[in-house]
Amino acid sequence: MNKEVVVCKFGGSSLANAGQFKKVRAIINSSPARRVVVVSAPGKDERYSVKVTDRLIEAWDQHKAGKDWAIPWQEIWVRFAEIAAELGLKTQLGTHFSQIEKQIRNGKASYEYVVSRGEYLSALLMAEYLGFEFVDAAKAVFFDNSRNVHPITYEKIEQFCHDGNGWVIPGFYGNHGHMTAIFPRNGSDISGAVVAAGLNAGLYENWSDSVLRSADPRVVGNPQAISLITYREVRELAYMGAAVLHQDAVEPARERGVPICIMDTNNPDIPGTMIVEDREVGSQVVAGIAGKRGFVRFNLAMPGLHDRVGFAARVLDVFSQLGVSVEHFPTGTDTMSVVVSKDSLGDKSQLVAARLQLLTPKNSVEVCNGIALVAVVGLGMVNHVGTMARITGALVKAGINIQMLTQDFRQTNIIVGVEEVSLDAAIRCIYKEFFERVEI
Ligand code: ASP
């Protein structure tokens, strides 16, 4: 393939019903370059408040618990049947559903196989609707033993999408040792990036229900749309909760120099957010703000901690031995904190605290729950004096206590820790400071 090809990935909200399928077809037909389509499973709409993938998980859980799984299964079936009927499609949905059911009943289906069927069925319908060829991700996307994408994937994708009109590939899953393997939730973004990288596409268009904005619209009313941003900035924002693109979708595209454009399926004519390697920094210091709840901080006090060679390594080793991933570890002269996500910590909080206690004097380990992190991201912060002061000033004015403050060495990301209850207020006041305050 070549640079003239555009790979388009459509998210769940863009495929939630027949009306959304029609919008997708209009978008694809509006440009001959849009020949490769990667799809999610149908998401939420006004009628269905639960994503197909979540219903599949529910059906699987009920089946595993020996309970009746007819109710979630029925809803999935009705949703696909409605889409097919309204679009006049002939795909034999009944045959596909009974095959999947059979696999589940005779114990041959895995969790990954079942939850990936939303993408599979969605892609079958979309392929027929567009008149494109269906490429099963089980034959094109391969995982290695560490569940990373195996390089053979890039060759396979090139082979499958070679001669023809256009192709539709289901997102979210692939193959590992002849079994279905899946990406993390919302992983169709990653599939799209992998396909775009494999084809050396000129552009990876990621279509969802919004372009990228400088803050979460649910927190800040009508935040500014971002027209141009770098891969690095987006990765930081996505990691800290900016929902439009999966954080792991950036790297495959970046590695092969494929620009990403985030587009809005419901407003296809408004310019999207272009994500590129580098950009000119204008007068805007901050590009975006994102925040996430669900962090825990372990505080350790130890006189003379800064002089003890190897102490920090021993502390971090406690986390690594228990398989807990460390996010930040700010230190003071006699103190050290380790911030981890609740997701990674699971139920090991007491165990971690007990092991840390063995390294420090009695009663000097404290566990603080309910921490949220706010990331303030922007290339414009590099060598720009006063950004930190503006952030802390805004928080002080809003009466928000800062629990932690750190900046990455590239100076493009400042992270502020606040109490979870203050997260939205913190984002709002920082947004106001950088996007609404008139400079004099
Ligand atoms: N359908 C999957 C999910 O809901 C993957 C995706 O939509 O990207 O997580």
Image (cartoon, rainbow, N blue to C red):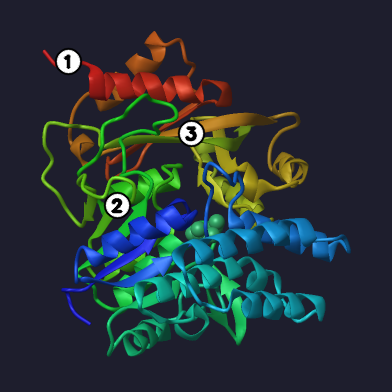
Amino acid carrying label 1: it is: Val
Q: Residue furthest right?
A: 66
Crowd class of label 3 (few under 14; some 14 to 19; many from 20; radius 10 Å)? many
Amino acid carrying label 3: it is: Leu
Q: Is residue 353 visible?
A: yes
Kindly identify which residue carries mark 3.
Answer: 373
Q: Are marks 2 and 3 in contact (CB under 8 Å)?
A: no
Kindly identify which residue carries mark 1.
Answer: 438
Kindly identify which residue carries mark 2.
Answer: 262
Please give the name of the residue rendered at 72% of the width and 77% of the height, measured from the top-left corner.
Answer: 109
Per the model, the C-alpha gap separating discs 2 and 3 is 25 Å
Per the model, the C-alpha gap separating discs 1 and 2 is 29 Å
Per the model, the C-alpha gap separating discs 1 and 3 is 27 Å
> Which mark is first along the chain, 3 or 2?
2
Where residue 39 sits: x, y (%)?
A: 44, 65
Q: Are marks 1 and 2 in contact (CB under 8 Å)?
A: no
Amino acid carrying label 2: it is: Ile
Front of the two marks 1 and 2:
2
Crowd class of label 2 (few under 14; some 14 to 19; many from 20; radius 10 Å)? many
Where residue 312 sits: x, y (%)?
A: 55, 46
SS of the residue at dot 2? strand
Between 33 and 416, the residue placed more toward the observer is 33
Between 124 and 435, the residue placed more toward the observer is 124
Where residue 229 sits: x, y (%)?
A: 22, 47
Label 3 CB, ligand 1: below 8 Å? no
Task: Name which quarter of the figure residue 256 lies in.
Answer: bottom left
Between 298 and 112, the residue placed more toward the observer is 112
Please give the name of the residue rendered at 32% of the width and 65% of the height, measured from the top-left corner.
Answer: 8
> Which mark is first along the chain, 2 or 1?
2
